[in-house]
Image (tube, grey):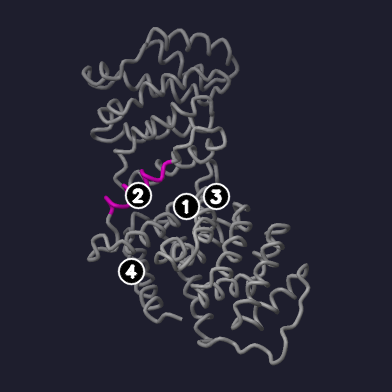
């Protein structure tokens, strides 16, 4: 419905195509990740073209509003289509859609007409609080499915979620904003899930940060203010200490590794070390935390920055999680590498190598059948 939005999208598609043809990069993405992003942009362009085919609201049927079967997706969709010009009736249909999404998110997400109309209603009625709330709750239910969150919501619905989060004061209720925040958080958590094959978490986050930066008019002459995006990402680190926050902490650390080459995240090393200390018994958090330290230590000033952040000490403490051989292998390999760092930096790390040796010997007895750990342990002891 917005010609400027379509023009902006067309320009971005052209820029991405040019980067692909030149074997270059765009917003830190290249090769497979950039091709995937190009496919996502093409899908978005197609969706916008479909929405642009009908410029005006469809007039509602004459007479009293028809009833519909709230338990039937085709019936709910029909009501959404016929009464899109009537916010009250659209809201009723969206509430029913939310219930269906809660019961079977896959059925709703697989209906392309339903998802397209859901997006259309959000765009047609941006200031209708009740309608926006019903729609946001539907998105929250859909986002419970990590696959739907990654493949559908992170590409097509980020714009409307950001619009709700950044709406002018007083235009939407706090409940609508909270629901938009919840849906956005679930999308990010889904893309940040450790171990997800071929995940591309930075795509959705970069889009979110870009929208946030544009809304705050930070350096309007640039598309992306990298320093600002870095600050936003670091500030988004979960601060809760409850066990329920462990997945979010692990996901944030995983994203930090993924975006290390795209953003200036070294100031976040101290935050990463704090998360490792806060969730010291969480295997996921410790695994991702060690990966963060390994990634940043490989940089030119990496050892010094990791040492200053207290990262080496946290890796030493993570070695104490005796039940996982993979974690202990990663920790030991990292601590052995620290021995090659400049002596002044090693001293700053304050590693208790007598304790490390004792834990290593104990772990060797515990993991006799894990060859990779035995090799790392023997190599470490020899060094």
- The residue pinned by badge 2 equals 232
Question: Is residue 130 placed above or below 324 in the rendered structure?
Answer: below
Is residue 201 or residue 336 the one in the foreground?
A: 201
Majority secondary structure of magenta residues:
helix
Residue appearing at x 66%, y 83% in the figure: 82
* Alpha carbons under labels 4 and 3: distance apart: 28 Å
* Alpha carbons under labels 1 and 4: distance apart: 19 Å
Is residue 203 or residue 99 the one in the foreground?
A: 99
- The residue pinned by badge 1 equals 200
Answer whether residue 311 is magenta in the image. no
Proximity of marks 4 and 3: CB atoms separated by less than 8 Å: no
Q: Name the disc covering residue 192, or none.
A: none
Q: Nearer the viewer, mark 4 or mark 3?
A: 3
Q: Earlier in the sequence, mark 1 or mark 4?
A: 4
26 left or right of 65?
Answer: left
- The residue pinned by badge 3 equals 190
Where residue 338 appears, as percent x and y from the top left, is: 32, 21
Question: Is residue 350 placed above or below 198 in the rendered structure?
Answer: above
**Mark 4 nearby-residue class (10 Å; few <14, some 14–19, many ≥20):** some
- The residue pinned by badge 4 equals 15
Question: SS for tag 2?
Answer: helix
* Alpha carbons under labels 4 and 2: distance apart: 25 Å
Proximity of marks 1 and 4: CB atoms separated by less than 8 Å: no
**Range of residues picked out in magenta:** 226-237
């Amino acid at each position: 419905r917005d010609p400027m939005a379509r023009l902006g999208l067309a320009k971005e598609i052209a820029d991405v195509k040019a980067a692909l043809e030149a074997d270059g990069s765009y917003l830190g993405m290249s090769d497979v990740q950039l091709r995937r992003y190009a496919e996502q942009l093409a899908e978005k362009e197609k969706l916008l073209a479909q929405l642009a085919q009908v410029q005006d609201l469809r007039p509602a049927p004459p007479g009293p509003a028809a009833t519909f079967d709230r338990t039937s997706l085709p019936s709910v969709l029909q009501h959404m289509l016929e009464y899109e010009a009537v916010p009250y009736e659209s809201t009723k249909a969206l509430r029913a859609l939310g219930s269906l999404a809660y019961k079977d998110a896959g059925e709703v997400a697989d209906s392309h007409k339903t998802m397209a109309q859901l997006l259309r209603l959000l765009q047609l009625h941006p200031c209708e609080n009740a309608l926006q709330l019903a729609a946001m709750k539907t998105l929250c239910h859909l986002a419970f499915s990590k696959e739907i969150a990654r493949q559908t919501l992170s590409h097509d619905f980020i714009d409307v979620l950001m619009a709700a989060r950044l709406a002018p004061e007083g235009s939407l209720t706090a409940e609508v904003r909270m629901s938009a925040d919840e849906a956005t958080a679930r999308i990010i958590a889904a893309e940040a899930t450790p171990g997800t094959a071929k995940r591309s978490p930075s795509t959705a986050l970069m889009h979110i940060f870009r929208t946030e930066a544009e809304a705050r008019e930070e350096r309007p002459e640039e598309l992306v203010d990298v320093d600002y995006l870095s600050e936003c990402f670091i500030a988004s680190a979960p601060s809760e200490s409850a066990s329920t926050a462990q997945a979010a902490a692990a996901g944030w650390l995983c994203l930090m590794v993924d975006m290390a080459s795209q953003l200036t995240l070294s100031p976040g090393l101290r935050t990463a070390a704090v998360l490792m200390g806060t969730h010291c018994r969480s295997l996921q958090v410790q695994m991702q935390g060690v990966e963060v330290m390994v990634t940043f230590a490989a940089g030119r000033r990496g050892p010094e920055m990791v040492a200053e952040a207290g990262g080496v000490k946290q890796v030493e403490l993570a070695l104490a999680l005796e039940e996982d051989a993979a974690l202990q292998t990663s920790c030991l390999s990292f601590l052995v590498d620290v021995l090659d760092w400049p002596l002044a930096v090693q001293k700053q790390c304050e590693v208790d190598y007598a304790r490390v040796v004792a834990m290593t010997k104990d772990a060797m007895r515990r993991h006799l059948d894990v060859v990779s750990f035995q090799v790392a342990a023997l190599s470490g002891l020899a060094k």
